[in-house]
Image: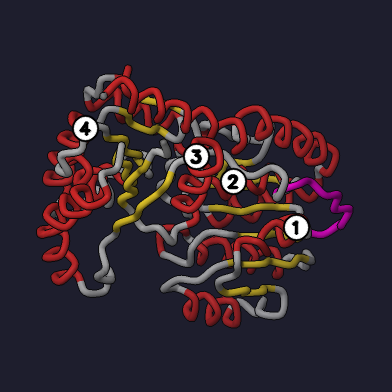
Amino acid sequence: MKRKILFLGESYRADAITWMKGLKEFGDFEIVTWELQTSNNHRFKRILEYFFSPLSIRKIIKKEKPDMVIAERTTSYGFLAALSGSKTIAIAQQGRTDLWPEESKLYPFKKFIQKYAFKKAHLIHAWGPVMAIHMKATGVDMDKVLILPKGIDLSLFTPSTNNSNKIEAIVTRSLMPEYRHDCILKAFGILHQKGIDFSLTIVGDGTRLQYLKDLSKELQIENKVIFTGRIPNTELPKLLQQSNIYISMPITEGVSASLFEAMASNCFPVVSDIPGNQSWITHRENGQLITIDNIEMLANELIWSLENPELRNETLIRNRKFVEENANYDINMKVIADQYHKLIDSRK
């Protein structure tokens, strides 16, 4: 008999799609989804919907009779999973702590509901070691924690040889303030002033799009910067293969599938020096770690990577091997699907 899972979360997100696709593919699960319908732009209405959502979720459980409920983000959908009354619950921490932003007035409330979600869950996903550190510090029963990334599809993200003698960089993160695209553009403004040739492709969409386009004009680099806007995920592997440097400057990070995709595609990673990236990157060994908001350092390290092509090429081979061994979607999602079946059996 086919087993059924109720997924609580934003089903359109690439992370969620990977998770659900893997469970169907390697666990033969049927997936039913539920998510909040009110946009984040209508804050009060969304909070109101969230308040009444346990009733909606319990109705779906009564109708669909899922064997298990899974949810992303311990402080939102994870908490709703904990309130669902399901016999079998798995939740995933998406960020380093999920308690973000730390200066938020809701911080103590988020801490409280996260603790409740951790307590009620029967399996907790830490997509990387940095998340497990937070869980342990919070007093989570670590026997319930599975430390494993979902992985990426290595048949799609394949290496290619880029022999270009100029920087051909790519950024694939959402155009939101926390990803610091402005710092990246300013660093390339410095390269332009130094007469260093480059191309920069910025993939995706977000609230900062127009601001960043205006900034690139102000820095007089608009002819060298390509804003692709939102693209289908199927087009991303080709863009990564055409690039030789991957840049990501977030101020907070859990586990970045974007970083794995770049490492698998032979892009040299230049990323912010934060715990979520330190788990995978060692400075000037298999990439570069840049202090948050340090524009001068980013510009200097990009120049260093350009001047050290031999080390860069050695790194690319090592990084591909690392991703094959640690972030292979076919292997990791099979492990996760098998864990779910075992959990359902043990909870009957």
User: Residue sitting at 61 percent across and 74 percent down?
Assistant: 227
Q: Quadrant of the N terminus?
A: top left
**Element type at marker 4?**
loop
- Three-letter residue code for mark 1: Ser
Expressed as whole percent of the image width and height from the top left, the position of residue 127 reads 45, 35
User: Residue sitting at 59 percent across and 50 percent down?
Assistant: 297
Mark 1 vs mark 4, CA separation in Å: 47 Å
Q: Which mark is residue 243?
A: 1
- Above or below 294: residue 314: above
Q: Quadrant of the C terminus?
A: top left
Q: Earlier in the sequence, mark 1 or mark 3?
A: 3
Q: Which mark is residue 87?
A: 4
Residue under pointer 2: 259
In the rendered image, residue 128 lying in the magenta stretch gets the answer no
**Element type at marker 3?**
loop
User: Residue sitting at 36 percent across and 58 percent down?
Assistant: 10
Residue under pointer 3: 28
Q: Earlier in the sequence, mark 4 or mark 2?
A: 4
- Can you tell which quarter of the image residue 217 is in? bottom right
- Above or below 100: residue 10: below
Expressed as whole percent of the image width and height from the top left, the position of residue 183 reads 52, 62
Expressed as whole percent of the image width and height from the top left, the position of residue 308 reads 81, 42
Q: What's drawn in magenta, residue-wise?
A: 157-167
- Above or below 308: residue 344: above
Q: Which residue is more in the foreground, 37 or 65?
A: 65
